[in-house]
Amino acid sequence: MLKLKLATDPRWANIAEKSLGEILTDHAYCEQKAATSGINMINFCPWHPRLVSEMAALVAEEWGHFRKVLKELEKRNLPLGHKRKDEYVIQLLKLKFGGGNRSNNTCENLLINAMIEARSCERFRVLSLNMEDKYFREFYHEFMISEAGHYAMYIDLAKDFMPEKYVNERWEEILEGEAKILAGLELRGDRVH
């Protein structure tokens, strides 16, 4: 379904599990940034009722996810910690076409957000299948399902702004570019991406 070009090594889940506080901190900030992205999309296209409605629901869900991850940190007496620079997203943003009209730019933003959600879905799947702790396998399974829905919603919304053929071709280009980015980044247990 995701059509990602580069799969995450399943052993990453065991590395992440060993630095649980750090992966939970990074996960919390990923959820916070996802909510912020939804708000930004609303601010960019307040005239598009479907986008506003979909993003409002996404913001509420992502903020709920942030709170859920925060509770996991609190249960373990772990602080939220500091937000880190997300090199994955920084590189991903460089794949966006710039200088187009509002429809092109909205489509690009939606597709980049779809890519982030797709990779998060894939990473949460790896955690849900490979962590030793059954509680966290179930915990991340729920997040995996949610991220899959967000990914599909972003792709579908992009087709409101540009023709389906264009969206499909751009998605393929972004998938190729994302695989190259991922291949160049160190796989770390303290980061979702």
Image (cartoon, rainbow, N blue to C red):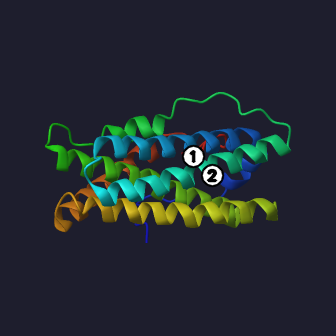
Q: Residue at 65%, 52% (x, y): give it.
A: 12
Secondary structure found at label 2: helix
Q: Which mark is residue 65?
A: 2
What amino acid does circle 2 point to? His
Q: Is 103 or 44 nearer to us in this picture?
A: 44
**Above or below — where is 58 with respect to 98?**
below
Q: Report the residue that reaches farthest toward the bottom.
A: 1
Q: Which mark is residue 31?
A: 1
Q: On the picture, is 61 further left or further right than 36?
A: right
Q: Are marks 2 and 1 in contact (CB under 8 Å)?
A: yes
Question: Does the image show residue 95?
Answer: no
Tell me the quadrant of the picture where the N terminus can be found: bottom left
Q: Residue at 67%, 56% (x, y): give it.
A: 11
Q: Residue at 30%, 57% (x, y): give it.
A: 49
Q: On the picture, is 155 further left or further right than 191?
A: left
Q: On the picture, is 62 further left or further right than 48?
A: right
The disc, 2 or 1, on the residue closer to the chain's N-terminal end is 1
Coordinates of residue 100 in the picture (x, y in percent)? 14, 42
* Image quarter of residue 41: top left
What amino acid does circle 1 point to? Glu
Secondary structure found at label 1: helix
Coordinates of residue 117 in the picture (x, y in percent)? 47, 55
Q: How many marks?
A: 2
